[in-house]
Image (spheres, helix red, strand yellow):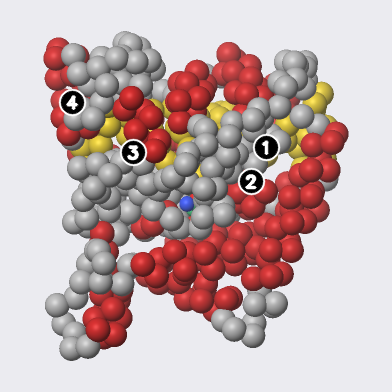
Amino acid sequence: MDWNGVATHSRSAEKWKAFVEARQKDLGSFLQFDPVLGCVDSSPEGPLAGVPFAVKDNIAVRGFRLTCGSRMLRDFVSPYSATVIEKLLKAGGVVAGKTNLDEFGMGSSTENSALMETKNPWDLRRVPGGSSGGSAAAVASGQAAFGLGSDTGGSVRQPAAFCGVYGLKPTWGAVSRYGLVAYASSLEGIGVMAKTVDMTETVFSLIRGQDPRDHSSLPWQPPAMKKGPWRIGVPRECADVPMHADVKKTLEKTRGLLRQLGHDVQDVSFPTLDHVVSSYYVIATAEASANLARFDGVRYGHRTRRADTPEAMMVASRTEGLGPEVKLRILLGTYVLRSGFQDEYYLRAQKIRTAIRMDFQKAFEGVDLVLMPVYPVPPFERGSAEADPFSQKLADIFTCAANLAGLPALSFPAAVEAGLPIGMQFLAPPFAEELLFGACRQVEKVFPSPDAPGFPAGWR
Ligand code: GLN
């Protein structure tokens, strides 16, 4: 089935809505599903005419709630749309609804949402990944043609990998962040999830470009696209990271496939890999503690009923409105930034960040692309003790690197092992997204996005 017109042409629209609502009961991907509202600002024409898409609920869509998965913003309705949304509506796309996420994007399982539980369409006992788990589940189950997410440290690529779809984290600055609720501004960007490389690329080409409303956005400036075969580097240090046997096996399988396709797959060195997680969590929490100071019960969001003074009101509003993971990160962030101690944590993390960037620069002198796993383990069970908050942070090792270096990265389905999808990712130099699409398209010909159980036959 062709996605065009699905959300607007009466017959297929009714069929599709019934399908989404039935799946929603199992999956919990949407916090708000309302394609009628999602049509309001949509153009009747364009490359995406009538194509329904899912939007992570930390991206503003006029008239929809913008909860960020938090009690703090549970009833907040956005008065405006993000730039990416305006662009997609102009292209004819229809917002199907807003999808679940870890509160403010903090997590890797969507279990940190204060509002709903989301399940993996491959196995309802398992998490869909996170933080953009709702969008990933919606795309993988056939509820939406594509999904938008945000990637600060892997939140588009990891849920895409957990659900068996493509997940693009663009070059930092290539896509406007206007209308994205900020978590860690220097690391994050809006990304795309879809069942095909073509759809991922189409959406990216519609949303990218400089935006006067986001002064950190950059003009689209792709380098000349190099023709294949490509030199592809796999960081030697990946082998030292504890990995599930199925992930290791998939890395080897992908290496072999790329060789068969005629590419020169070689080892590269990435000596700072070991420091990626610690520097990421220092910088991300520092920025989060500043960005989340705006939720004070004064301007918007939850306000306590029980307080006698303005200060007590702010404290109680934040205590009641924010969840434990968010509080932990605000505390960590204020700790690493406290006066007199910045040299010890924040400035050191920034130096490591520079070293990471330089490692990549050096690697890209010898290779065109870097190949890495996305996550060290396959989709894990909901509420499982092995995936406690600390091990989940350590497991961000393969994804955070691209964010610290500002590089584009695309995760792709690479295998199904024991009934669960496993993803790998390519990283490229800044603005070389085309190279990512080119490489993934070759893999896609051999191994397309596998359909999750219940995926409607022929919908892509
Ligand atoms: N797992 C990472 C974190 O918890 C990813 C977050 C993200 O990319 N938004 O910070």
Q: Which residue is mark 2?
A: 406
Between the C-alphas of marks 3 and 2, the distance is 23 Å
Between the C-alphas of marks 3 and 1, the distance is 25 Å
Between the C-alphas of marks 4 and 2, the distance is 38 Å
Between the C-alphas of marks 4 and 3, the distance is 16 Å
Which amino acid does the dot numbered 2 rest on?
A: Gly
Q: Which residue is mark 3?
A: 55
The location of residue 7, given as percent across then percent down, is 22, 21
Q: Residue at x 39, y 70 (%)?
A: 293
Q: Which residue is mark 4?
A: 17
Disc 1 is placed on an element classified as loop
Q: Which residue is mark 1?
A: 430
Which amino acid does the dot numbered 3 rest on?
A: Val
The location of residue 172, given as percent across then percent down, is 58, 43
Taking the image as drawn, is residue 237 in sight?
Answer: no
Which amino acid does the dot numbered 1 rest on?
A: Pro
Whichever of labels 1 and 2 marks the residue nearer the N terminus, that label is: 2
Give the image quarter of residue 327.
bottom left
The location of residue 449, given as percent across then percent down, is 49, 23
Disc 4 is placed on an element classified as helix
Ligand 1 closer than 8 Å to label 2 CB:
no
Quarter of the picture holding the C terminus: top left
